[in-house]
Image (cartoon, rainbow, N blue to C red):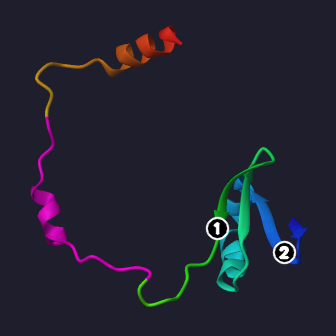
Amino acid sequence: MTIYDYNIIMLQTNIASLKARLSYYLSFVKNGQDVLVLERKHPIAKISAVSREAGDSMITPAKYPFSKLKELKGITPKRKIDVVKLLREDRDRR
């Protein structure tokens, strides 16, 4: 679907169609068109091309190598937590 407004054509799509045909919509974005994403006929996002100017974006190098991720240790709780019970309590409050 397209919107015609002041000589600008903007494609519209819903989330399911965007997921199913992402490459199709990205080809329009690469050619400079914007794509408006709708959820139940309400706009929630706009996909547009990134400007190609040199100073727009900067890639920051990682501080540590990827192999260091294996050394990370998670936090273990001090007491046992019943997740199902917490979810039920949260849902009962609603």
Which numbered tag is attached to residue 13? none
Q: Which residue is mark 2?
A: 9
Quarter occupied by the C terminus: top right
Please state which amino acid type lies under the numbered disc 1.
Ile
Q: Residue at x 74, y 53 (%)?
A: 38
As drawn, which residue projects farthest toward the front?
6
Residue 71 placement (x, y as % from top left): 9, 57
Q: Quadrant for residue 34, please give it.
A: bottom right
Q: Secondary structure at mark 2?
A: strand
Q: Along the line of sight, which residue is nearer the eye, 2 or 88?
A: 2
Q: Along the line of sight, which residue is nearer the eye, 8 or 67?
A: 8
Judge left or right: residue 71 versus residue 60. Answer: left
Q: Which residues are magenta?
A: 56-75
Q: Residue at x 65, y 83 (%)?
A: 30
Q: Which residue is mark 1?
A: 47
Residue 67 colored in magenta in the image? yes
Q: Secondary structure at mark 1?
A: strand
